[in-house]
Amino acid sequence: MFIHNYRYFYKILTKNKGLLFWTLIFPIILGTFFHMAFKDIEKKESINPFNIAVVGNKNAAFRLALDEAQQGKNPIFDEIYYTDYDEAKKLLEEEKIIGIIDWTTGKPEIYVNKSGTNETILKYFVDETIIDKEIDYHFAKNNIVDATRVNISYTMIEYYTLIAMTALYGGALSIYMINKLLPNMSSMGKRIGVSPVKKKNLVLSGTLASLLVSLISMSILLLYTLVVLKVNYGDDLKKVILLAFTGCVAGISLGLFIGIVLKTNENAKIGILIAITMFLSFLSGMMGITMKYVIDKNIPILNIINPANMITDGLYSLYYYTHLDRYYFNLISLIIFSLTLIVISSLCLRRQKYDSI
């Protein structure tokens, strides 16, 4: 019976054109637009190494990070002036440097004259290297940015958020599925409500069928971006796939939560899911890496609990850093997020009664 229900849900999910549009067609279209917009961006807007000044730095680990960022085929920094604040300010006013990193107070303060790509890279480099706390040599050595990859970071973030968005859009599948099973949402649900069929088996089979469709959609998107769009996700594709698939689980759990908790029609629930997903994707950098930086810097809790950012940041760190601590932190956070919503959804589903039906 379980296999029969599983096949049934898979069949009705794959025949729903609206669901297939949001979970497969729309992400592919958006990815194609990204490719059209960004394919020449590195040629037209290449990031050349820029000059900075450093004041009062006594942190050997940070000095090591700066030295590493000057090396490689595509270094971040050209000249680094180690000087006093007055001289650094003069260099900044004369536009001989992009910014100043001032360690006088014991913590790095960044001073720039304007906002731009190079200024954002400088701020992000400092924040990601230091992570706003004292670091020792071992910490810095394992958190140094791979300078050879900085040129792609601000465009690759768009593809990472695309993967995150697609994963969360999978929630539309579980919303559709759970609405079919709820007595107050569909005629099928009413029949199930008075039948001797075990509700747990139906919900489980429907959820797994939804997850399968979501995983297939994600696989097609990854294949399309890899083969057709020639997106370079780095050397460890297995970890990219693992995080993307875990994101699909998070999307299905989010859909279950919305589908069970909200008392409204199916279209409204899917609309809410899409709105939430787009907002979360925006916070994680879909409209530009600057927003991700602003949130990370000023309201970090938002991105810590944001599943779209967990996926985006995990993929970003996998490509951008030499260690895997941050990747696994995001992976585990996604699992915790998913389990939390599944538990809450299960408790809410058990408490629902339909005496009037």
Image: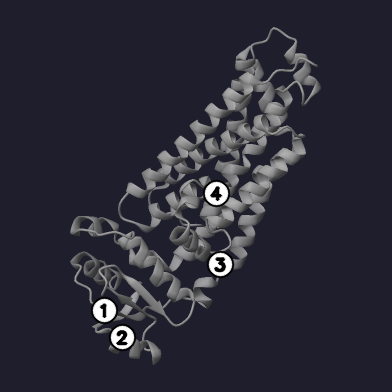
Q: Confirm or deny contact between disc 4 and disc 2 (CB under 8 A).
A: no
What is the crowding at mark 2: few (fewer than 14 residues within 10 Å), some, or many (at least 20)? many
Residues at marks 1 and 3, CA–CA distance in whole angstroms: 38 Å
Q: Foreground: 42 or 325? A: 325
Q: Confirm or deny contact between disc 3 and disc 4 (CB under 8 A).
A: no
Q: What residue is drawn where x is 40% and y is 69%?
A: 123
User: Seen in the image, is 235 located left or right of residue 254?
Assistant: left
Q: Foreground: 184 or 177? A: 184
Residue 181 position by quadrant: top right
Amino acid at dot 2: Ala
Say which residue label 2 marks.
88
Marks 2 and 1, the one that precedes in the sequence: 1
Residues at marks 3 and 4, CA–CA distance in whole angstroms: 18 Å
Residue 220 seen in the figure: no
Residue 255 appears at what percent x and percent y? Answer: 63, 35
Say which residue label 4 marks.
163
Element at label 2? helix
Marks 1 and 3, the one that precedes in the sequence: 3
The quadrant of the picture occupied by the N terminus is: top right
Amino acid at dot 1: Val
Element at label 1? strand
Residues at marks 4 and 2, CA–CA distance in whole angstroms: 42 Å
Query: Which numbered marker is on residue 39?
Result: 3
User: Seen in the image, is 5 located left or right of residue 122?
Assistant: right
Query: Which numbered marker is on residue 55?
Result: 1
Element at label 3? loop
The quadrant of the picture occupied by the C terminus is: top right
Q: Confirm or deny contact between disc 2 and disc 1 (CB under 8 A).
A: yes
